[in-house]
Amino acid sequence: MNRFKISLEKKTSRSHEVFIGRDILDRAALLIAKGNWAQRYFLITDAKVAALHGERVAETLQKAGLSLESITIPAGEQAKTMATAVAVAEELLRRGADRTTGLIALGGGVVGDLTGFVASIYMRGIPCLQFPTTLLAQVDSSIGGKTGVDLPAAKNILGTFHQPKAVFADLEFLRTLPAREMSNGLAEIVKCAVIDDPGLLELLEDWAAILRRGDDLDTLLPIVTRAGEIKKKIVEIDEKEHGLRRILNFGHTLGHAVEAASAYALPHGEAVSIGMAGALALSQRLGHLPDADGERIVALLQKLGLPVRLPAALDREAIMARMEHDKKKSGGMIHFVLLKRPGMPFVNGGIPGERIREILAAAAPERKAQRRVKTGGK
Ligand SMILES: NC(=O)c1ccc[n+]([C@@H]2O[C@H](COP(=O)([O-])OP(=O)(O)OC[C@H]3O[C@@H](n4cnc5c(N)ncnc54)[C@H](O)[C@@H]3O)[C@@H](O)[C@H]2O)c1
Ligand SMILES: [Zn+2]
């Protein structure tokens, strides 16, 4: 089992450990008993994860002597709402949860974000533990303490920072994860490698074929650990996203716009993969990144089975409009994380819309690109 510590300044009570391994539930249970963070725990999970893993996790924790009850929410992003948070809080209250109660999030990023959010506000804050069960949650959302729920008009718009007491990422959960959910996580791992770890980039290149298959947990373990450590390092320096933490948005400016323009039909990881290809093209076009580096990363995304071009059905003006819309939230500029070299990202806030349109045109699939050449060549 690998482990690392997240050390946060001033309030050391926010520092905690992340445990990553295979078959670590027994050890997790003992560590929770030893951690003594609460007298009683509620396991918060979604309906899908409950059916696949809920019972086994609950039994393991109870065997270690922990007092544990469960609350199940519906699966999927649609459940990440204030209404679900209120329903969970009401259920906690009904069952007598108080300040000596702790929450354990068992699930993907939706369960993790929502549980962390409820834990941060229930009776002004109770302890929370994370058991991430998707690859995305193991390398990304369970680390860093960001919690939240969505409003119909915007994702993650209501939220808090609430660090968990510990994170237990058991790779065995991934055995039941659908391939598309695996690729969501892989996209975030490529992102981590690109912004911070050229060595990890090489590992991903070497093992792309195995990773794409998704069933070799031994290969995955060092990779998940390294990606988690990258996020840890960034969060330790900039917990509340005043600056550096923004580099974790590499591929996400365009990725979020693509995701929204597809009405969330495109999975996050695929949208981010397209967004990373766009950010690389932009970095190349603006003369920051050598073409060979950009091409190398795009080739890796493709080897992992991730898309790098816009789906034919997506209107690029709708994507532009989405970025213009997001711009208002970030001080009137479209912020792009660009790259100088693998491991050397920077945030650029003043990219002309015309440059972005060029990249979008070039990122369209063949059919659309040809149409543009015919109609657009004034
Ligand atoms: N807090 C952060 O820093 C942060 C970072 C990135 C993303 N996020 C958030 O994370 C969310 C996305 O997370 P996600 O991709 O894990 O989505 P998710 O939680 O919706 O999980 C995806 C699907 O997989 C199912 N599932 C989970 N574990 C499974 C398993 N082991 N086997 C089979 N099915 C399983 C879930 O029921 C769900 O249907 C978004 O809401 C996003 O905003 C948060
Ligand atoms: Zn992401």
Image: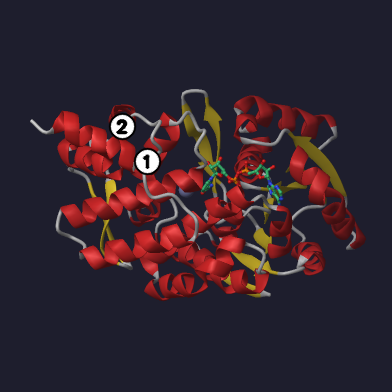
Q: CA distance from mark 2 to mark 1?
A: 8 Å
Q: Can you tell me which quadrant of the image ligand 1 is in?
A: top right
Residue 43: tell me if it is visible: no
Residue at the location (52% across, 23% down)?
152
User: Is residue 136 left or right of 355 when viewed as pictured?
Assistant: right
Res 65 quadrant in image: bottom right
Quadrant placement of the N terminus: bottom right
**Local secondary structure at mark 1:** loop
The reply to whether dot 2 and dot 1 touch (C-beta < 8 Å) is yes
Tell me residue 267's x, y (percent): 52, 41
Q: Nearer the viewer, residue 366 or 268?
A: 366
Query: In this rendering, would 204 be left or right of 137?
Result: left
Label 2: state its secondary structure: helix
Q: How many marks?
A: 2
Q: Which mark is residue 344?
A: none
Amino acid type indicated by mark 1? Leu
Residue 377: x, y in percent?
11, 33
Q: Is 201 drawn above or below residue 49 in the view shown?
A: below
Earlier along the polypeptide chain: callout 2 or callout 1? 1
Q: Which mark is residue 316?
A: 2
Q: Is residue 316 visible?
A: yes
Q: Residue 310, labelled with which disc?
A: 1
Image coordinates of residue 125 in percent, x first then y, are 64, 42
Residue drawn at the location 42% of the way across and 50% of the way down? 273
Q: What amino acid is labelled 2 in the image?
A: Arg
